[in-house]
Amino acid sequence: MTSPSTRGPGPDGSPDEENDASAASNPTRRIVVAGGGIGGLTAALALERVGFSVLVLERSDKLGEVGAGIQISPNAWRVLDELGAIPATEAAMVYPEATRIGSARAGGIVGRVPFGETARHRYGAPYAVIHRGDLHAGLAETARSRPGIEIHLGMAVADAQEDEDGITVEIQGSEGVSSYRAEALIAADGVWSTVRRRLLRLPSADYSGRVAFRATVPVEAAPDLASFTGLWMGEKSHLVHYPISAGREINLVAIVESDWHEETWSAPAERDEVLGYFKDWPQEPRRLLEHPHNWLKWALCDIGPGAIWAEGRIALLGDAAHAMLPFMAQGGAMAIEDAYVVARCLANDPDVDEALLAYERARKDRVERVMRTARDNARTYHMKGMMAFLRDTGIRYLSGTRLLSRFDWIYDWRP
Ligand SMILES: Cc1cc2nc3c(=O)[nH]c(=O)nc-3n(C[C@H](O)[C@H](O)[C@H](O)COP(=O)(O)OP(=O)(O)OC[C@H]3O[C@@H](n4cnc5c(N)ncnc54)[C@H](O)[C@@H]3O)c2cc1C
């Protein structure tokens, strides 16, 4: 694969002066995407589809996702479908029948939200769950099949200088620093984004005082949960579970209130530490939590509303722009939607600064509403006493379809 760069990195990361000549005769519009996560790879697919030549720079030496599962709601599934990424991921997806809502206070299930055919019919797209590694591998496979996309591993965006005609992106690789000339830099470099902090001088995401523990169990440990997602709410803690890996495993995410924080996605956690938070819980969720012996933990962060997303030729996307609490299961979905919209905006307006501002305007209200709803859920899920009783009674009173309809504004989004 040849690099489309003006002064682009060779596979070893070194500056490639020879590319100057080929670039001068090639009028293709070039975009650099920082980060090869879910947001960055989807952005590459969306940008390539509207005619850009895309260089994805990923800091890690290999592509992959940490953390086991991810829920792909219909709004995100639809975008992935339109970008041609479903065939490479579908075999690993599970389409749950429903989500069951349990309450530790009530000691059992208090509600059921139908997915399955109901979601397909209502939104024209399914609700899916998948292992992150499988989603990521499918996105990477799809991206690698597109002639306009190059993915370079072990290369981090370190800096950038803009001028009237473009942006020169500085790249740190194992062999040193190189640079690459493009029209715009799309930063999908995650919650601890370098572009956000160093280039745009924006504040970091804030620790939320909540920690997520993650583990998987073989489906044989809980075969009755093989076709459901589940949410169990308790005082200062909750548990989410769903099938992944084509139904072979169940993914567990247990969330608690805690001051622990480190900038990592994969700190190991002790089984006893996890179980300690859930010792007073009913037997059904406890049985699930007792199964795994290996847990990982990470501190949950979010970014407050009102932050800048785009400046000049640089735009933030996904967690770099709007890391949010995962209590709507929408952080990745919003990154996927962002990717689609930023590509459309850049395709529609040759003035890059204006196009990126249009992207920010098009996305912000919706994403901030999702972030606020996730913060509200953080309070609702962890209620205690009378408030928890009223919450559970309210859920019991509503039909499944009524509960689902509360998500229409999210799931029915169309590109
Ligand atoms: C517990 C939990 C559960 C969740 N569940 C869901 C869910 O069910 N559904 C959902 O939609 N979302 C969910 N989310 C949110 C979702 O995981 C994130 O929103 C999503 O992964 C963000 O993708 P991203 O591409 O923006 O960032 P990331 O996935 O973090 O990718 C960023 C990439 O950039 C690379 N990088 C970093 N710095 C640089 C640099 N300087 N140069 C080049 N590369 C760089 C990193 O190595 C990484 O590969 C959950 C989150 C958590 C914490």
Image (cartoon, helix red, strand yellow):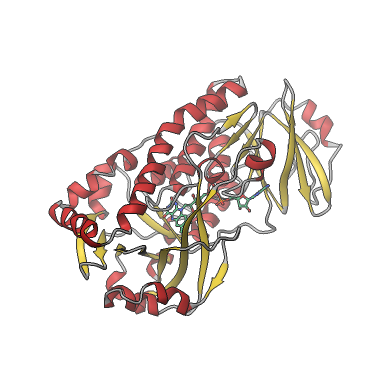
Q: Return the x and y of residue 355 as percentages of the image width and height.
A: 56, 24
How far across and how far down the image is residue 40, in percent? 58, 45
Left or right of residue 293: residue 382 = left
> Where is residue 282 drawn, in percent x and y?
27, 75
Quadrant assignment for the C terminus: top left
Horizontal side, residue 99 vs residue 331: left or right: left
Q: Position of residue 92 (x, y in %)?
A: 43, 61
Is 218 placed above or below 14 here? below
The residue located at (46%, 47%) in the rendering is: 324
Corner quadrant of residue 186 = top right
- Viewer-nearest residue: 380 or 35: 380
Above or below, 59 against 218 in this view is: above
- Among all residues in the image, which is located at the extreme left? 397
Going by the picture, which residue comes out furthest to the front? 385
- 364, above or below 73, in the image: above
The residue positioned farthest toward the right in the image shown: 17
Looking at the rendered structure, the number of numbered marks drawn on it comes to: 0
Q: At x 57% / y 52%, what residue is drawn?
A: 140
Q: Nearer the viewer, residue 190 or 166?
A: 190
| Left or right: residue 300 compared with residue 34 | left
